[in-house]
Amino acid sequence: MLLPFENFHSLQRFSDFLDKLSHLSKENKESITEFKRTCDSLQSCFDSVKCGHKEDEHRNVTEHMNTICTTVVYMYDDFGECMEKLEANNSTCFQQWTPLKKLHKSEEIDDEKLETLKKEMCTNIFGKEKCMKKEIIDECGEEKWNGAKKHFVALLKTSVPCELGELKM
């Protein structure tokens, strides 16, 4: 069985991806630029796994990483101006909005807590009672809402099995 990161360069890029992802900061524009470079360099690895490997496990990992790349780049680039408006407005909905939680087991998170976090992520990806939909449309317009929805739904699909209902694309 071939691994999705079968050569040293791909493994190195994968490690760089994880490092850059953990150090992303909207205050540090260089961290965003570096993350984009890492995503660009991983693209050939994504493509080789999509085309060359049939193992679902490997394809799922690379699809998830690719979705993270496209979502993060979208949020910082195309959605950046809208995000600034939302931050300036500083509504209760926006303050409480935590769309992306760390969803992995650790000393603080057991299996039961992990399942609870996953369910919360599914139901609150756009805030309590989907309040961010109205916030985004009011501040930035329908087009920005559709873009944000598209990227977050794609991220959910690769991260957590959810019943997306009206959010399905």
Image (tube, rainbow, N blue to C red):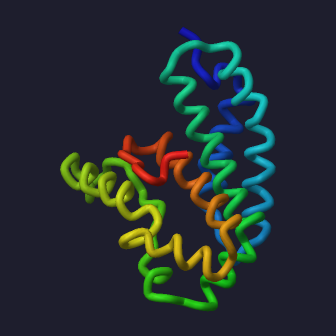
Name which residue lies at 37% across and 54% down.
122
In which quarter of the view is residue 14 placed? top right
Residue 135 point in image, percent of width and height: 55, 79
On screen, residue 149 above or below 64: below
* Circle count: 0
Where residue 113 sits: x, y (%)?
23, 55
Q: Tell me what residue is drawn at x 44 percent, y 61 percent.
A: 125
Q: Is residue 120 above or below residue 40?
A: below
* View extreme (left): residue: 112
> The C terminus is located in which quarter?
top right
Residue 10, percent from left and from top: 70, 30
| Snapshot quadrant of residue 79 | bottom right
Which residue is depicted at the point 71% across and 38% down? 13
91 or 104, nearer to the observer: 91
Left or right, residue 35 beside residue 105 = right
- Picture layout, residue 143 above or below residue 94: above
Q: Quadrant of residue 77?
A: bottom right
Q: At x 76% / y 35%, what residue is drawn? A: 43
Depth check: give the residue in front, 105 or 61. Answer: 61
Question: In the figure, is residue 108 to the left or right of 134?
Answer: left
Q: Nearer the viewer, residue 5 or 36?
A: 36
> Looking at the picture, how far across and down is residue 30, in whole percent?
79, 67
Judged from this view, the residue extending furthest toward the top is 1
Residue 15 or residue 102, whichever sits in front: 102
